[in-house]
Amino acid sequence: MSNNSQKKSGENKIIRAEVIKDAIIIAVLVLSIFSRPILAVVTGSQAPIAVVDGYSMFPVLRMGDIVFSYKCPPQDIHVGDIIIYRGIDGELIIHRVIKVVVRDGEYYYVTKGDNNPIEDYFEFTGPGVPYQRVVGKVFDVNGAVFKIPYLGYMSIWFHNII
């Protein structure tokens, strides 16, 4: 093989590597932009991906953890499940269900952060958080919460600087 053809072959490999790198970057950007809406449709949850921003669920959930949720029927939420719900001020809250109340056919959930001393009374309307404010149930595998540790710090950091 001549020196000239080796040079062209090396240049082609570099160009291919650059094209592959650029394609991967574009794919990651497209996925990051469209994954949330796609997951929202698939899971039925308004917040299919949520970032833990606080210590109320420590040690199960830590600041910066990313969790996944899905919308399920109200009767499928039980004591011990972790749910994501909208607080009275509209903020998302990720806490554990410690009691389920059914009143006049409506479901309410008494919730509490694992690291908090008391229930979320200030968030209740009626005997607990009404199902209408539940955004989703946190996905778990055999009782263990499926989470991605630390990755959510980027979101927290970005949110705090804006």
Image (tube, helix red, strand yellow):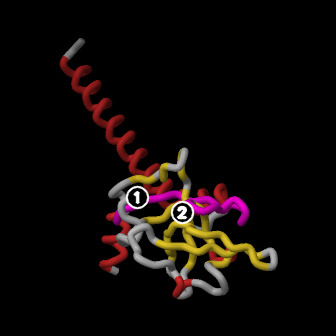
On the image, which quarter does residue 105 sit in? bottom right
> Which residue type does callout 2 highlight?
Ile
- Identity of the residue drawn at 32% across and 41% down: 18
Q: From this view, report whether residue 52 is shown above or below residue 127.
A: above
Name the N-terminal-most of marks 1 and 2.
1
Residue 124 falls left or right of residue 154 = right
Q: From this view, report whether residue 3 is shown above or below residue 121.
A: above
- Of 127 and 57, which appears nearest the observer? 127
- Residue lying at the far left in this picture: please name it: 3
Asked whether residue 149 is in view, the answer is yes
Residue 50 percent across, percent down from the top left? 48, 65
Residue 114 percent across, percent down from the top left? 43, 67
Total marks placed: 2
- Identity of the residue drawn at 60% across and 65% down: 136
On the image, which quarter does residue 154 sit in? bottom left
Q: From this view, report whether residue 54 is shown above or below residue 147.
A: below
The magenta stretch is 60-80
Evaluate if marks 1 and 2 touch, with contact meaning CB atoms under 8 Å apart: yes
- Identity of the residue drawn at 54% across and 46% down: 141
3 in the magenta segment? no
> Which residue in the structure is indicated by mark 1?
60
Quadrant including the N terminus: top left
Asked whether residue 64 is in view, the answer is no
> Which residue in the structure is indicated by mark 2?
82
Residue 96 falls left or right of residue 154 = right
> Which residue type does callout 1 highlight?
Val
- Of 37 and 100, which appears nearest the observer? 100
Magenta stretch prevailing secondary structure: loop
Q: What is the crowding at mark 2: few (fewer than 14 residues within 10 Å), some, or many (at least 20)? A: many
Residue 146 percent across, percent down from the top left? 48, 51
Label 1 SS: loop
